[in-house]
Each structure stands twice: as C-alpha cells, then as structure tokens.
C-alpha cells in the first residue's frame, strides 16, 4: 500500500480575541492608517444593521438579513479587491457591497422591495444579491472564465455560507473553475448556522476548507473575526488568481450573533447563553482593542466616527424613504431588452388597474 | 446553396456566428473533441479552439450556471444540454437567474445566452432521452422558447437566438436532425424570433404545431388535400413570446383549429394557444378547438413510443371531427 496524496489545511489568525497581535503582522496591517478604514467600514455595517432592523420592526423595510458579528468577512474581502474585479454576494454581504461602492440607500431600496436597489450606480459589473443558495458560485466561475478568455486582469469573488457548501452548485462550480484555472476566489462565511441547522449537522468534514482539496485547489481556513487574517488571505488569493494561479477557497470562521433574518427567531433552536459567549470573539471590539493598544485610536475618535456614521445612515434612510415608488411600466420594461408584442397588452392591463402614482412608501 | 439536414444547419449557424462574433462561446458535455453526441458541434473546436468550444465536466447545473456568469460579463455562451431529460437541473439557474437578471438589475446586467438541447421522441432512444419539456420553459417570464422544424428555420432561428440580447431556450427535435435535407443558404441571415411561420395556405382548417410534429401535420394536410380539405399549417417556431396574431388571423379565415404537439396534454403549450383562441377568436370559430397531443402519461420506452406520438391518422381524425361539428 502506498499513500498517493496527502493534504493539509492551514488556519490563520493574527489578532487574538482581545486584540493582541501575532507578529509579524502582514505588511498592510503594520500601518494603522490602513486598518482604520476597515474599522470604519465594519462599524458602518453594524450601525446600518441596527437601523435596518429598526426600520423593519416599524414596518418601513421588508425582511432583512443582518451581518451582526460577521462584518470582518465582507470588509476584509472587499477591501482586498480592485474596483474592476467583480463581486458576487449572497444575501448577507452588504458589508462587502458597501466597500465596493454600493450605497446604503441602494441596499435599503433592495430590502425595501425595489429592484432599483440592485441597479448599483457604483460597481457596474457586480452581481445583485443572490438568494438561491450557492447558485452564485456557478455565476462567479462563469464570470471568471470570461475574464480569463479575454485576458483581462480581473478576478471574480463570491461569498457563500456554510450551508451553501452542501449544495451541488458549489461543488460543480468549484470543479469547473479549478479545471479552467479561472480567476475565482470563493469565501465561505462559516457563521455556524444555516437558519436553524448548526455547522455540525451540515457536514461531517473537519473543515469546510478541505472541500477545495477534492477539486484540486487550495483551501484555507482563517479566523473570520480577525479582519487582518481575512484581508490578508483574500488579498493573497485574489492576487494569485489575477496572476493566473487559479481559484482558492477560503473558509472564514465566525458566528451569526443575530437571527437568520428579521423573520427568524433564533431562540427557538439555540441557547442564548451560547450566543452570549460568542460576543467575546466578535471582530469590531477585537480590532478596536488592537488599535487602542497601538495608540492608533481613542475614545474621542470613536465618538467622532460613530457620529459621522450615524449621520451617513440617517441621510441614506431619508433618501430611501423619500424615493417614490417605481412606475408600473418598470415591471415590464426591464424583463426583455425590447418589450415583446405579446406583453404589450398585459402592460396596458396593469396600467389600467394601477393605483395613482406617488403612493405611500412601504 | 448546400443541401443540409437539421443538425448540419445547427452546426453551420454556430460556425457562422463564432466566426463573426468572438464573444460567442460554446460549452457542454462532449461537444469539443467528439463534436457532440449528435455531432451538432462537429469540427468547431478544431476551428475555434478549446477556449471557445469548451468540453465541460459532466454537470448540467454548472453548465447553465457558468453560462450565466459568462453572459453577464459580456460573452454570448451557447450551452448544450446533451438530452432534454437532463435539462431539469438547469431550471434553477434559468428561472431564478438567466430569465430575470436584466429585470433584477434594472437593465444593468443582461444574460444573452442560448441553452440548446435535443428534444422529443421517435428515435428509439434510451430512457430519459425523448422528453418534450417546452411548456415548462414557456411558463417562465423572461425566457424565449424556440423549437425549429426544418433545417432552414433551425439555421435562421439559431442565429437570431444567438443575437438576441436575452436568454433563449432552443429545443432541437432529434427526430428531425437527419430526417430530411433542404437547401440552406449559409449566409448569416437570421429569421425573426417571436413570429409564427405559415407553411401552407388553406381555407378549411388551421393546423398549428411546432418541432418534429410539423412533419406529421404536413403529411396530414397532404392527405386531407387529397380528400378536398384544404388545411392551413402554421409552425409556431417561437413559443414564447407567442405570435397569437398569425394564428388568430388564420382561424378567422378557416373557422377551425387543431393544435398538434408531442408533449403531454395537460398544461401543454397547446392549452395556451386554445385559451388564446377562446379569449380572442371565439366568435370566428365554427367548431371547438381540438388538441392532438402526447397523452398525460410518462413517455413510453422505445417499443411503444410511436403509439404515444401523435400520428397522421390521429391528426386527420381530429380534423374530421372539427369539420363534422358544424
């Protein structure tokens, strides 16, 4: 008998939960001025989540999926991308979308039930939020193929959940991308829960990162609550892909501190005390403690930052609430490049029965 | 002009568009070196390279899903699903993504892909190789559904499908792949999508069909003509969006309509045409609309399949019933 293959999965963490750093830090993290924008983006996401949930509870927003506790993944990944790269989000990736240039108001419009929320004025080639689980990995592999075929120095980056790694779409897409050596980075936000199903009931595999091994590509695991580790792993994988090195799977370990969505009640299936324990590992306090220890942050700057973020969110909410309803025609005019004749009569019917424009929002 | 059968016409259309639009790429199982199990893509990998004629792993979901990613990023993928019985894993991506990407992004991203697949029975194929799933796709807003019935229309409609800025499901009747040849000018001229084609003029009854069933329908029209019954024959060609106007105008002249399709009856696309006639053409009808279709049973295996498929006899019998109705 002979061993024909042997594999290892590496785990990386630079910042301990209390903010203590393992030296040497990656190059970018040695300069606190490069960490502060990441800190700001995480705080923005958390404040946005708080506001969005409040809007939902008061009937001003539809069902919403908070990123509470997982902010380091979106911010760490998106900040490692170039603007010309393409991001393919799942429905819990607004942290990354904001870094990419999607506006807070666009995100609110989307969750408020308005397709214009996915018309992104900023990142024009980024995909809209993907709700059917893991399907975006296929799209990302195809996008990456297009970049490679045209010899463009662009990378497709997608995020998926731990539950998504159980789906065939994920395996199939990873297999395609690996064969194609396409410039693709897949990031698993392993927040330990797929609605009510814990990670332990999702897969018997020791790690989700090791699923990459079956496809013949690199899989690595990072502490997803350590933004330095996330950003560093994402940056390495993205630049490897850009240089023709093929796809990478990154499993980022985190914890979903909130409900699955505003339509969920997590107390039905998990112990509140266990959730409480996880607050000791969350990413924002971790980076703040790190910055404070390096004398790169202060209580005054924190207050100033939260004030700025609050104003930014208030302005976005105001913009969202003041946005008039889409027109009735809009339901028809974007389905096809040209309205088929067969649909014209149905559009006329909808217009005839449409309420007067300018109705109340939500 | 060359005498081409339908599968050769498909091949010529693919080759023409690949030669004239470098955004066009083909992907699917066994389409490269092997030229496709029906040889629809024969010679194309040799001519256009492995990067544009992609032999994929055996995974229909990812064939559809990666085609969407390619299309959204400016390529024009033509994906082949080897047999229509294997098309069902693509539904998630077609329904949830391809058909609605433009709408979801308010026109920011589009999905100009073509999903080709053989369809239909009558070639003594193995299990799951003889399906007629077209009606499922016609129920999906945002998809175009095209079924050619001759080499010439296969050529022109496939070119149109590849040039359309939105997703098209293009179902090719396997029974017609090599059934007959006709002159096809390989000149890059597309036919219009979204219109029906009147193949034969007649004054007594309108026969409406698509795909391989046009073959039996035209044969039935010949037989009826010998009896002095002049049947008008319409090839629907693009099922979605449906050109109901052409059908209504014909029925307004003939007063009678028989719809022929191979797929099962309930929820079949014939029901949509019959409903359209009831809504918009009822007072022009002299007799109830009749459907001659596959039965609401599983497509039988090869030994009984010809008893499932609508025959010339069944079509003629249905026409006689409409003629006797009033």
Image (cartoon, rainbow, N blue to C red):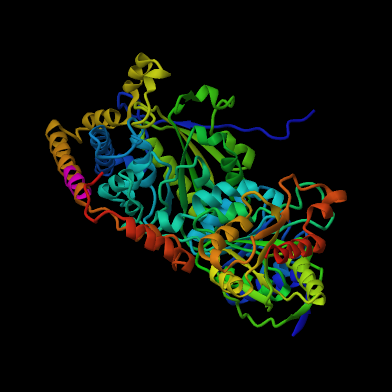
Q: Is residue B156 visible?
A: no
Judge from the rendering whether residue A56 lies leftward or rightward of residue B294; answer left or right.
left
Going by the picture, which residue comes out furthest to the front? B326
Say whether residue B65 is magenta: no
A279 lies above or below A227: above
Q: Between B189 and B257, which is closer to the camera in this rendering?
A: B257
**Which residues make up the magenta segment?**
A314-320
Q: Residue at x 73, y 76 (%)?
A: B230
Who is closer to the viewer here, B23 or B12? B12
User: Who's the residue at 36% across and 19% down the image?
Assistant: A275
Q: Position of residue B4 (x, y in %)?
A: 77, 76
Question: A81 or A189, which is in the foreground?
Answer: A189
Q: Residue furthest bottom?
A: B1
Looking at the image, is B164 positioned above or below residue B28? below
In this rendered view, identify the residue nearer to me: B22 or B311: B311
Left or right placement of residue B206 versus residue B95 in this view: right
Left or right: residue A82 compared with residue B240: left
Q: Main secondary structure of the magenta part?
A: helix
**Quadrant of the rendered image containing residue A149:** bottom right
The N terminus of chain A - image quarter: top right
Q: Position of residue A113 (x, y in %)?
A: 33, 46
Q: Is residue A355 visible?
A: yes
The picture places residue A216, in percent across and down from the top left corner, at 63, 42
Residue B274 at what x, y percent from top left? 60, 59
Instruction: Report which quarter residue A279 is drawn in.
Output: top left
């Amino acid at each position: 008998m002979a061993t024909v293959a042997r594999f290892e999965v590496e785990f990386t963490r630079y910042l301990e939960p209390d903010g203590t750093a393992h030296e040497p830090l990656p190059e970018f993290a040695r300069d606190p001025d490069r960490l502060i924008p990441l800190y700001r983006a995480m705080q923005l996401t958390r404040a946005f989540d708080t506001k969005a949930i409040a809007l939902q509870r008061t009937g001003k927003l539809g069902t919403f999926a908070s990123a509470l506790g997982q902010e380091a993944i979106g911010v760490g990944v998106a900040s490692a991308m170039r603007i010309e790269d393409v991001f393919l989000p799942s429905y819990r990736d607004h942290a990354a979308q904001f870094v990419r240039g999607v506006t807070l108001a666009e995100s609110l419009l989307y969750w408020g039930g308005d397709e214009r929320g996915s018309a992104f004025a900023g990142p024009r080639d980024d995909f809209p939020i993907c709700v059917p689980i893991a399907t975006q990995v296929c799209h990302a592999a195809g996008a990456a193929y297009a970049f490679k075929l045209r010899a463009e120095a662009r990378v497709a980056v997608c995020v998926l959940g731990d539950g998504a790694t159980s789906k065939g779409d994920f395996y199939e897409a990873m297999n395609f991308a690996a064969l194609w050596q396409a410039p693709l980075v897949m990031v698993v936000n392993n927040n330990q829960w797929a609605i009510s199903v814990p990670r332990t009931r999702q897969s018997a595999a020791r790690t989700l990162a090791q699923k990459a091994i079956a496809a013949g590509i690199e899989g690595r695991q990072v502490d997803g609550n350590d933004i330095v580790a996330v950003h560093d792993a994402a940056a390495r994988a993205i630049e490897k892909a850009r240089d023709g090195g093929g796809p990478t799977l990154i499993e980022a370990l985190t914890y979903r501190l909130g409900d699955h969505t505003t339509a969920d009640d997590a107390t039905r299936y998990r112990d509140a005390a266990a959730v409480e324990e996880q607050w000791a590992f969350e990413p924002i306090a971790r980076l703040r403690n790190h910055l404070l220890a390096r004398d790169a942050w202060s209580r005054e700057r924190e207050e100033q930052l939260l004030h700025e973020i609050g104003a930014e969110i208030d302005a976005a909410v105001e913009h969202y609430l003041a946005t008039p309803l889409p027109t009735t025609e809009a339901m028809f005019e974007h389905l096809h490049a040209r309205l088929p004749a067969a649909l014209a009569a149905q559009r006329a019917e909808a217009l005839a029965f449409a309420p007067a424009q300018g109705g109340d929002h939500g | 002009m060359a005498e081409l059968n339908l599968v050769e016409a498909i091949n010529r259309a693919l080759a023409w568009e690949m030669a004239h639009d470098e955004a066009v790429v083909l992907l699917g199982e066994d389409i490269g070196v092997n030229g496709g199990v029906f040889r629809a893509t024969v010679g194309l990998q040799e001519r256009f390279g492995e990067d544009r004629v992609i032999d994929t792993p055996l995974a229909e979901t990812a064939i559809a899903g990666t085609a969407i990613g390619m299309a959204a990023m400016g390529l024009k993928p033509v994906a082949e699903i080897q047999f229509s019985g294997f098309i069902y894993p693509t539904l998630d991506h077609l329904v949830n993504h391809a058909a609605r990407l433009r709408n979801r992004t308010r026109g920011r991203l589009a999905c100009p892909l073509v999903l080709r697949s053989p369809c239909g029975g009558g070639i003594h194929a193995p299990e799951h190789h003889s399906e007629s799933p077209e009606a499922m796709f016609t129920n999906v807003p945002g998809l175009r559904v095209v079924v050619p019935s001759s080499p010439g229309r296969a050529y022109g409609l496939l070119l149109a499908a590849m040039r359309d800025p939105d997703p098209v499901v293009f179902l090719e009747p396997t029974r017609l792949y090599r059934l007959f040849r006709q002159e096809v000018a390989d000149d890059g001229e597309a036919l219009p999508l979204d219109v029906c084609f009147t193949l034969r003029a007649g004054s007594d009854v309108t026969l409406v069909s698509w795909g391989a069933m046009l073959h039996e329908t035209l044969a039935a029209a010949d037989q009826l003509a010998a009896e002095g019954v002049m049947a008008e024959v319409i090839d629907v060609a693009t099922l979605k969006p449906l050109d109901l106007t052409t059908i209504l105008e014909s029925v307004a002249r003939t007063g009678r309509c028989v719809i022929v399709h191979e797929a099962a009856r309930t929820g079949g696309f014939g029901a949509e045409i019959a409903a359209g006639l009831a809504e918009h053409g009822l007072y022009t009808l002299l007799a109830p609309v009749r459907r001659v279709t596959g039965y609401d049973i599983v497509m039988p295996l090869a030994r009984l399949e010809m008893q499932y498929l609508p025959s010339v006899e069944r079509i003629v019998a249905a026409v006689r019933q409409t003629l006797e109705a009033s």
